[in-house]
Image: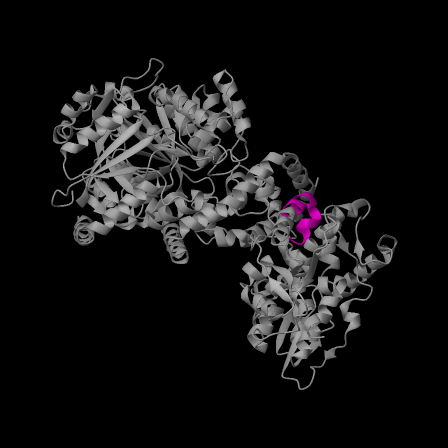
Amino acid sequence: MTRQEAFRRRAAEALANRRIRENLGRFGTAYRTARENALAVLDYTAESARLRRMKEDAVERLPELAEQFVEAARQVGAHVYRARTAEDACRYIGQLAKERGVQLVVKSKSMVSEEIELNRHLEQMGIQPLEADLGEWIIQQAGDHPSHSVMPCVHMSKEEVAQIFSKALGRAIPPDISLMVRLAREELREKFLAAGMGISGANIAVAETGTVIIVTNEGNGRLVTSAPPIHVALLGYDKIVPTIESAAPHLKLLSKTATAQQLTVYTTFITGKTGTSQIPRPREFRGSSEAEMHIVLLDNGRWAMRDDPEFREALYCIRCASCSNVCPTYRVVGGHVFGHIYTGVIGTVITPFHHGWEAAAVPQEACLLCRACIDACPAEIDLPRMVVAMRSRIVEQEEEKREARGIRRFFLNRILPNPNLYHLAVRLGGVLQLPFTRGRTVLRNLPGPLKKLTMFRAMPAVAARPLRSRVAAVLPARGETKRTVTLFGSCLIDQFYPEIGEAVIKVLNHYGVTVHYAKGQGCCGLPAYYEGQQKAAGRMARDLIAALESSPGEHIVTATPACTVTLKQYIPKLVQKDPSWEGRGRSIAGWTQDFSEYLVEVVGLGDGTLGEATGEKVTVTYHDSCSALRGLRIQQPQRRLLRMLARYELRELDDVGECCGFGGHFSADYPEVAGEVLNRKIAAIERTGADVVVLDSPGCLLQIRGGLLKQGSAIEVKHIAELLAEALD
Amino acid sequence: MPVLNQLEERIRQTWAASRRHRASIRTRFQAEVERVGGIVQVVTDLQVVGFSIAGVAKARGITRCQAAEPDLARDLNLERALAEAGIELVTGPAPESIPGTGIGITRAALGVAETGSVLIHLDEVDGHLLSMLPEIHVVLLHQDALVDSLEEGLLLTRYLVLKSQARGLPSYLSWVTGPSRTADIERVLTIGVHGPKELHIFLLPPTGEGS
């Protein structure tokens, strides 16, 4: 089974559960507003930068800070055990419990204990671990594992939780949330004093004082760390910071981004064990009554992560789960599909270091590369960059093991990089499609292995004549030539939407721009790059640089933002290690501009009126492509152009910035997931009441137009170039 | 300890700033505590506190209150007020009575206006548990122990921890921001899971200098 097949199978189970999707979907929507409100009190950019600097410094100085932490903790009588592996940590804690005669262990929430599967280890030794965090307790009773690092049972409904309560308590419990919370309080209250050991995680560890900082809302963290005589704090090296004061941006941003609170209810600073409770213990108490604190400082791949320049920044994570909360696919499939033990994007990125590359290979398929997580991460971690790096290592490993075969790899490595072969292949597709198009330009249902493509959307037919055959090498400006550009057509416009290309040319010519169409241009390599096929992407980068740099345009313009991102950001990176190409890559990046931005920034368009208003205005809405919005940071130029158009009135989407689910190969490989993401977008479009969706990306156009057509909607979808061209008639 | 000396200098400046802005810091603190579901009462006459606590206890049907320190009970006229209401008062450590106590009364070392937090610094485990196990937690805080920002609060926390640590002593400090809460089931906010369901903060008159 290929990686893609394995992921599709995994996702199918989650997709079959409508409830997960509804719960996560509602949460994702509510989260955006709550988070914005909580963050409104501070300068988010400045605070994030502060957190980032603090974590960069802490990880850089980790060897020294770790020594300082260990020393300081020992000064106040804490025992520190430096565990290299998960097994080491489990063994230490298990032996300690055994030696002290402990039979019951109460735990507050600790993702590290999930990472090392501590509960299983303790149970095998005949020691009962009991989760005290309500969500974790529910998960434990259900024999499940957390699907979200902040809200472990976010995937469950109250009815499901009531069933778990009924089973655990041995009587029928109605799905009444406040009742269940009260019952959990009563049920667990006795256990804090009956337990011989409390195990906690830590949010922060302070080098200067050997302090462990724990934040909880319920209060279980305080009870677990104070009521039992022995406290074991289990934490990774990544938690160490220099001083209590340096934790300020961490504490501020964690609570606001994780749960939209100004501060978590209990922020506890534990430095050693201050004594033992004299409250009479229940009869079932077993263990030693001497006060002890043990700190288990875990490596389990963290030092390797620190030494890996591509993945070091994953150690800056503060586990707020923002990246999951804003992730379009997480919100469809949940953390059991998107994640191994650690969930969501960051969870998947760190999985190779804790649980091996094989454990990460299938879950990482869930990433659409929409970049929503970049803007949500308070530590400014570039997760999409790490996903691509992870993919390229997975591909390398598969090639070593000769696992990578099949049409897909052949296409990305042999066909796509060769403009002639690739063109030929698409043209062949154009011939083969004839029985299905029956003269129309859309394909509603494709047969056999291609069925996936039209599962939730109609596909555009291959154009009868591609853009390259329709246009001359030089397309002169109307009147005097004020500027010149080289047009990079992009595969989608060239082969499927040549009319968009013609609209682009028409607009540019109208405003005094002479357009050169460089005929040797092939694919920009993005499909290979995103799939981790770096060698193929590198070959395409060089070929494209050669084709474009010989064209005389002052700028390179594209109307496909994903390709603009490739030209400006990925191509320079792909050739940077090659001295003869490095400078050329940077030049290409510097010359390239996206269509809308070029019109506004270079041509100076954006004010005044275009076209005539005849009758009532047509309502349009604008869909930002992920590539333009977060890849290029272009949001205003398109709106300025739209506002010039006299015929149209803009009404914004209420989910501005959310991905449409296209994601290139993603929507072809995982139509069920992409279709769900698209359904949300279509619902938002419908809420605006617009007659036309305007956008700047042929990829989003393929997705949204295809979905609307499939659903029988009359809403039109147009590239912004088409609207501008119409207005010039 | 040069670090401690530096911190002391910065702390002096913090208290000076807090004194200058006492009224606005107090207003901000009250608003933030209320936002997280706590209740703040500004007290001018200490004797009133006892009667207020007795009132809360009576309304909730609570039969026993416990104060961490005996002098607290005296200062606040707790004994008389609770006796009049027929409510038992336990003072001092008395660990055996904590699990059956309805209201735990403790002092706070510090209040932070930005977040509406109080710093409970009770190294003695049972004093600390008295602020956690009862359904209601009553906190006594002097107005001049309020600082404005989270950063200032962390400065003081760092100082307190470091001072114990320098002498080889463990410490246990908690910032408490509102009553215990959870949203683990369907994200519905529910108050009072493992910790107190109610948090009452009495802002006492200034003692002169910050503690």
Nearest to the observer: residue A459 or residue A622: A622
The quadrant the C terminus of chain B occupies is: top left
Left or right of B58 in this view: A396:
right
Is residue A285 shown above or below B13? above
What's the magenta bit mostly, secondary-structure-wise?
Answer: helix
Query: As drawn, is A706 to the left or to the right of B109?
Result: right
For residue A148, side relative to residue A470 (left or right): left
Residue A351 visible here:
no
Corner quadrant of residue B89: top left
Frontmost residue, A298 versus A670: A670
Task: Please tell me whether residue A169 is drawn above or below residue B36 in the rendered image.
Answer: above
- Is residue B144 found left or right of A430 in the rendered image? left
Which one is nearer the viewer's eye here, A523 or A539?
A: A523
Residue B205 shows up from this direction: yes
Count the labels in the image. 0
Q: Name which residue lies at 76% across and 54% down.
A: A459
Splitting the image into 4 quarters, where does residue A72 fall? top left
How far from the left and from the top, in percent, is residue B185?
Answer: 48, 32
Return the x and y of residue B36 as percentages of the image width and height. 35, 40
Residue A217, compared with residue A444, is above or below; it is above
Residue placed at 78% from the left, 65% from the top?
A420
Q: Position of residue A14 (x, y in %)?
A: 63, 36
Q: Residue furthest front?
A: A615
Q: Residue at x 26, y 23 (%)?
A: B58
> In this picture, which residue range is highlighted in magenta?
A663-677
Q: Is B142 inside the magenta-drawn segment? A: no
